[in-house]
Amino acid sequence: MTSTLSRRLLLTLASGLFALGAQAQTALDGITKSKTIKIAIPTDYPPYGFVGPDMKPQGLDIGMAELIAAKLGVAVELLPVTSANRIAYLQTKKADLVISTLGKNPEREKVISFSAAYAPFYQAVFAAKSLPIKSWADLAGKSVAVTRGAMEDQELGKVAPASLEFKRFEDNNATIAAFAAGQTQLVATSASVAGNLMYRNPGLNLEYKLLLKDSPCFVGVAKGEDALLAKVNDIIAAAKAAGELEALSKKWLGRGTGELPL
């Protein structure tokens, strides 16, 4: 009887030690062993993430995912996600990281961790490169297309000169179509919409002019994965210092990163 109990006790202890060892393996350990990192990205939100003519994901977030994988010396597996399920991919360990225009707020901070910011996400005034706009005063006497009631409409109303003519449209598509058709000289919209417009209509020679509101993007990391978070932050800091983040932002958004928060 004593011998049987001893064996059972040993088996229980061994099982417990095995479980502890399994739990001790971090996401970074798994990435290092498999030589692959799984990163959730958008494919329906240009210019941050979309499917190109070759049917492969491309955009700023894809570029960032590839940069992190390269710095880690591993392959990258891109996992398309939506705004609704991207955090769940972290919580269920389907993804090691989420790089999908992820903004930081107190509610999200309760369930996942955030890296330092890697890219801007902003609302701004855009116009052709040939139109000299350096300050809000330069908008005097000009016309701007905005979506009625949108953040751009509200923010621009706070700083615009009285003589700026607002042409308000009921949805984003109508706003962009009006500007592209030459109905206004300026358009106030988000970086994602403007970036997509630049990509699809290079003849407009569109460029960023004035910032309305900034809300940067962060990499999402599962709670408790401190080693991976630290590694990602090191990569972001080095890429920022080397000008790599600036280059990604200019390529896809037409504007540099500006001051990104840690």
Image (cartoon, grey):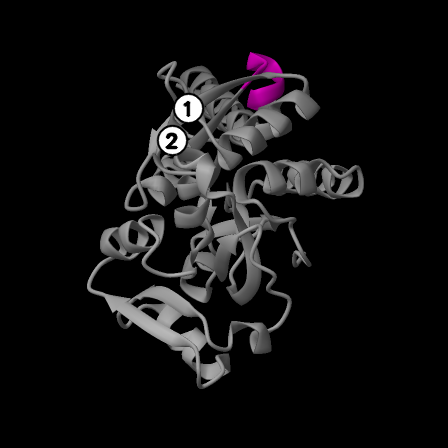
Q: Which residues are magenta?
A: 30-36
Which residue: 37% across, 69% down? Answer: 151
**What amino acid does circle 1 point to?**
Pro
Q: Mark 2 Cα within 10 Å, few/some/many (few <14, many 20+)? A: many
Considering depth in this image, is 56 or 133 the residue closer to the camera? Answer: 133
In reply to whether residue 33 is colored magenta, the answer given is yes
Left or right: 209 with respect to 152? right
Question: Residue 109's mark?
Answer: none
Q: Quadrant of residue 144?
A: bottom left
Q: Mark 1 — residue?
A: 57
Q: Name the residue rendered at 19%, 64% in the picture.
A: 170
In x, y percent, where is residue 128? 51, 51
Task: Name which quarter of the figure residue 229 lies in.
Answer: top right
Nearest the eye: 39 or 192: 192
Relative height, residue 162 to residue 145 (above, below): below
Coordinates of residue 42 in the picture (x, y in percent)? 38, 35
Quadrant (top left/top right/bottom left/bottom right) for the C terminus: bottom right
- Mark 2 highlights which residue? 50
What kind of element bears circle 1?
Answer: strand
SS of the residue under disc 2: strand
Q: Position of residue 71 (x, y in %)?
A: 69, 25
Which residue is drawn at the image coordinates 62% and 72% (left, top)?
A: 135
> Is label 2 in contact with label 1 (beta carbons under 8 Å)?
yes
Residue drawn at point x = 42 percent, y = 20 percent: 8
* Sequence-first disc among 2 and 1: 2
